[in-house]
Amino acid sequence: MPSRFVIIGAGPAGMRAAEVLRQKAPEADILLIGDEPHLPYDRPPLSKAFLIEGLQPGRLWLKPESFYAEQRIRLRLGAAALGIDRAGKTVALAGGERVPYDRLLLATGCRGRRLPAPFTAEPVHYLRSLSDAERIRAALRPGLELVMIGGGFIGLEIAASARQLGASVSVLEMAPRPMSRAVPAPVGEAVRALHERHGVVFEFGARLNAIARGADGRTLVETARAAYPADLVIAGIGAEPNTALAEAAGLAVEDGIRVDARGRTSDPDIFAAGDVTRHDNPLLGRAIRVESWQVALNQAAAVAASMLGAGEPYAELPWLWSDQYDCNIQALGLFEASLELVLRGDPAAAFTLLGLDPEGRIAAAITVNNGRDMAVLRRLVATRAVLPKDALADPQRKLSDLLKAARSG
């Protein structure tokens, strides 16, 4: 039985893995290494409550500091891991220390994608870490003009927070609608209408020409069609998995650290979990990489058990959510081009969008201000239920009744 466990990455995945390892291996030595100086913290509030409500950083901690001492989980925070010696089974840290391991977990997460060099002459903010959020929160104020580059989940959550704080917001998005890579057109259009009702200005099909200092001393963000004066520029243009350590160690990498459903890499003593992984999903029958709270915590728990030679493969459908103003969006499964869309409800208010595969089975679902549907939808999607389209599209027909009919059928 391995006794020395080292985890690189002190985010939600690293914290959860350490917690499960301690539960299942009471005598093991567990070391959690993080390059940030903070205790492991919750990231979803960074673009929402942390900006709006002025939360103190301590409110974000996933566990209090006392938890790690009580559970005998050693912390090495503010320490960057520089390399992995697979033959010697050690991790090199900044400062020269080498840490031995029996089993190693990589939970290195993602980093925000940066704008290319022509657009870096003026300051551009990104939101990935608590320190990033603190800088943005310090800059936001009523009357400020914010230019948000990117209309995905993070960009729109920041836009909503900024509007609620009284800032003016312009969102520049290369795609023809918001969140185009994550949700189908009806959801994107509903979100666009929501933001426009709150005063957000959009430019779609936007192509950046320059980010430069204007004649009045303010930043000017220029696209092929317009110029936007800005007191603050933030880019939310996606994320890239932190695979450098894995690549340098010769592990298999494919838009993420490539692992099986148990989190095993191409080295039998090295595992990976969380956003950084491209992992086999038994329910979908293929490998996926998903950036979500669900994967960070639940996959990490499954992988921790695998590190001890126990547990089950991680098998969950992707689940994402976003809160913008008073609107809650939840997405279950993956909406692929082959799915037929069935709308249930009013796109101007609350609705559910279902995705049916070519055999008519429910393969994915999104709720917009309709979260009460999600519990039943999880069961319908998990069982790949086949139900009449007219019944699915009728909001007067309860999904719970349809579920019973599917079971009795």
Image: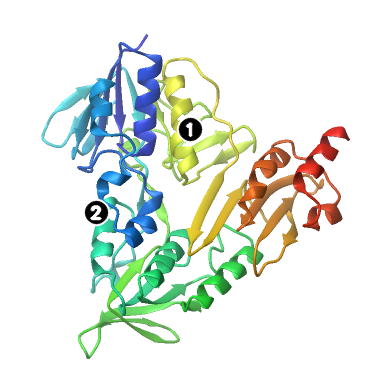
Q: Is residue 271 left or right of residue 100?
A: right
Counting from the top left corner in percent of width and height, residue 134 is at 25, 58
- Residue 184 lies in quadrant: bottom right
- Describe the element under mark 2 as helix, strand or loop: helix
Q: Is residue 344 left or right of residue 255?
A: right
Q: Quadrant of the N terminus?
A: top left
Q: Is residue 70 left or right of residue 179?
A: left
Residue on which the image places disc 2 = 131
Question: Upstream in the sequence, badge 1 or badge 2?
Answer: 2
Q: Residues within 10 Å of mark 1 (few under 14, many from 20)?
A: many
Q: Give the distance between the C-alpha atoms of the residues marked 1 and 2, in whole angstroms.
A: 26 Å
Residue on which the image places disc 1 = 299
* Residue at 34% from the left image edge and 26% from the top image edge: 18
Q: Residue furthest left?
A: 95
Of labels 1 and 2, the one closer to you: 2
Q: How many numbered discs, if any?
A: 2
Q: Residue furthest top?
A: 1
- Residue 283 lies in quadrant: top right
Q: Is residue 293 left or right of residue 50?
A: right
Amino acid bearing label 1: Gln
Q: Is residue 382 above or below residue 191?
A: above
Amino acid bearing label 2: Ser
Q: Is residue 199 above or below residue 83?
A: below
Q: Quadrant of the C terminus?
A: top right
Q: Are marks 1 and 2 in contact (CB under 8 Å)?
A: no
Counting from the top left corner in percent of width and height, residue 290 is at 50, 45
* Residue at 20% from the left image edge and 42% from the top image edge: 37
